[in-house]
Image (cartoon, rainbow, N blue to C red):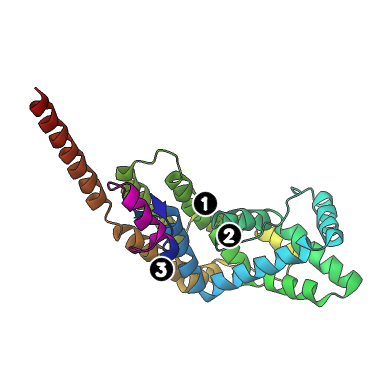
């Protein structure tokens, strides 16, 4: 059985897991691996100011369009004119980490439309929120971080989905985690996929913003933001999953199975 780390569920004395163990003596408690992954991601993001700033901006952006159908229609109209997908901004939530992946992907795909819509709304209504969000999105570090996250988050999301499969094999968890950590290393390469993708979009981005992208500025971001963020994310994931000591859980299961088999053999011998 797997729960999060809250005492209500995981407490050794009065937690749900302890009560269930009284009913089923052979029950095993494992801290929910998806929750561990979520905690690792949230901690790394909160410890990296530029990444934390991006999530604050995305949350503000979601609220701006979500609570105003008129503004949402303005964004939709711009997306149609620019022939971009009519995507809604998804709410990023720390308790639902997969929502970050969907939110970043939607903002990246409709970046030009979102910035244009915000600027149009400000010109028509002089709403300070529209100007503030536009300026935040047009910060070079924000834009580069969005492209970085669009590469990093799917890797973490894929691991999360794999851990949520109905019949997850405990022995497969460590290889899955290791594969994800190796993939995250690729984001720090000078010619990483997300960097090449960002440079391909350079002309389109510069048409709607004052951002000037150069290989030097991106390299600086990689060294000052991307590398520390990814190293911290990897360290958090590694420490949390290693601490689970999966092998000990497997060994415990094997011991209990052997004990059960021994008991059944003894009963059979007594009867015969």
Name the element at disc 3. Answer: helix
Point 70% across, 59% down: residue: 111
**Dot 2 crowding, Cα within 10 Å, few <14, some 14–19, many 20+:** some
Res. 147 mark:
2
- Residue 210 horizontal/vertical position (percent): 72, 71
Looking at the rendered image, the disc whose residue lies closer to the viewer, 2 or 3, is: 3
Task: Report how far apart the C-alphas of labels 1 and 2 lie in the structure.
Answer: 12 Å
- Stretch in magenta: 9-28
Queried whether the magenta region covers residue 11, the answer comes back as yes
Q: Residue 192: horizontal and vertical position, in percent?
A: 48, 56
Between the residue at mark 3 and the residue at mark 1, the CA separation in whole angstroms equals: 17 Å
Write the residue at 69% across / 59% down. 203
Q: Which residue is mark 1?
A: 154
* Residue bearing mark 3: 232
Q: Are marks 2 and 3 in contact (CB under 8 Å)?
A: no
Say which of 212 and 260 sits in front: 260
Q: Nearer the viewer, mark 1 or mark 2?
A: 1
Please report contact status of discs 1 and 2: CB closer than 8 Å, yes or no.
Answer: no
- Label 3 packing within 10 angstroms: few (<14), some (14-19), many (20+): some
Q: Is residue 182 magenta?
A: no
Looking at marks 2 and 3 on the same chain, the residue that comes earlier in the sequence is marked by 2
Residue furthest top in the image:
272
Q: Is residue 119 visible?
A: yes
* Residue found at the very far front of the displayed protein: 271
Local crowd at mark 1 within 10 Å, few (<14), some, or many (≥20)? some
Q: Earlier in the sequence, mark 3 or mark 1?
A: 1
42 w.r.t. 129: above or below: above
Q: Residue 262 occupies which quadrant of the picture?
A: top left
Write the residue at 16% across / 40% down: 259
Q: Judge whether residue 211 can be spotted in this image.
A: no
Nearest the camera: 252 or 233? 252
């Amino acid at each position: 059985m797997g729960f999060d780390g809250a005492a209500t569920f995981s407490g050794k004395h009065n937690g749900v897991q302890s009560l269930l163990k009284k009913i089923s003596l052979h029950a095993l408690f494992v801290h929910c691996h998806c929750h561990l992954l979520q905690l690792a991601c949230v901690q790394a993001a909160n410890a990296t100011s530029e990444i934390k700033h991006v999530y604050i901006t995305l949350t503000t952006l979601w609220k701006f369009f979500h609570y105003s159908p008129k503004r949402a229609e303005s964004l939709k109209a711009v997306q149609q004119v620019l022939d971009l997908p009519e995507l809604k901004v998804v709410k990023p939530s720390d308790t639902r980490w997969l929502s970050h992946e969907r939110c970043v992907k939607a903002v990246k795909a409709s970046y030009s439309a979102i910035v244009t819509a915000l600027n149009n709304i400000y010109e028509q209504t002089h709403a300070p929120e529209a100007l503030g969000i536009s300026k935040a999105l047009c910060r070079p570090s924000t834009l580069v971080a969005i492209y970085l996250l669009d590469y990093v988050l799917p890797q973490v999301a894929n691991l999360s989905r794999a851990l949520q499969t109905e019949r997850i094999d405990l022995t497969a968890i460590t290889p899955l985690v290791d594969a994800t950590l190796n993939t995250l290393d690729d984001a720090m390469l000078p010619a990483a996929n997300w960097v090449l993708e960002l440079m391909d979009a350079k002309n389109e981005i510069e048409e709607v913003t004052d951002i000037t992208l150069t290989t030097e500025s991106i390299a600086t971001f990689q060294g000052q933001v991307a590398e520390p963020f990814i190293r911290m994310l990897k360290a958090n994931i590694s420490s949390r999953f290693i601490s689970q000591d999966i092998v000990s859980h497997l060994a415990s299961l094997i011991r209990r199975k052997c004990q059960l088999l021994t008991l059944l053999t003894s009963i059979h011998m007594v009867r015969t």
